Amino acid sequence: MDLKLTGKKALVSGSTAGIGLAIATGLAYEGARVIVNGRTDERVRAALSQIGAGDLYGFAGDLSHPVDGGSGRGVGWSNSDTRP
């Protein structure tokens, strides 16, 4: 399926495991430039290795606010648990 994501930027929070990792993998497969996010460098590196191919970047840190995808320049997906 061609979702026309080639060259689009996508930041997927919580993408070191579970559904976040699956989303990041799918976006990378569709040609998006994916920023993988998790709370530790170790988890981010492991996720990047698991995804393997694509235009991948890693960012370790706790994102406590939803991603603003309203700019039209990329794809935003917040997979963060923001419950107290």
Image (cartoon, grey):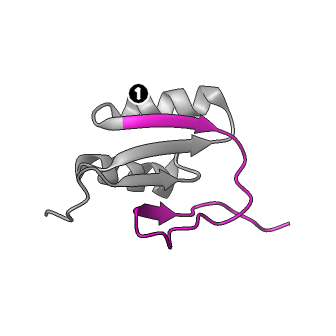
x and y percentages locating residue 58 in the rendered image: 52, 35
Front one among 36 and 84: 36
Which of 69 and 46 lies nearest the eye of the viewer? 69
Q: Residues within 10 Å of mark 1 (few under 14, many from 20)?
A: few
From this view, report whether residue 4 is shown above or below residue 56.
Answer: below
Magenta stretch, main secondary structure, is loop
Q: Is residue 71 left or right of residue 23?
A: right
Residue 52: name its quadrant.
top left
Q: Which residues are magenta?
A: 56-84
Q: Position of residue 62 (x, y in %)?
A: 72, 47
Residue located at (40% from left, 45% from top): 34
Look at 58% across and 51% down and name the residue there: 14
Report the quarter where the C terminus lies.
bottom right
Q: Which residue, as the protein is rendered here, is positioned at the far left?
A: 1
Tell me the residue that label 1 is attached to: 49
Q: What percent of the width, then of the height, locates residue 5?
A: 26, 58
- Please tell me which residue lies in front, 8 or 51: 8
Residue 56 placement: quadrant: top left
Residue 28 is left or right of residue 35, and the answer is: left
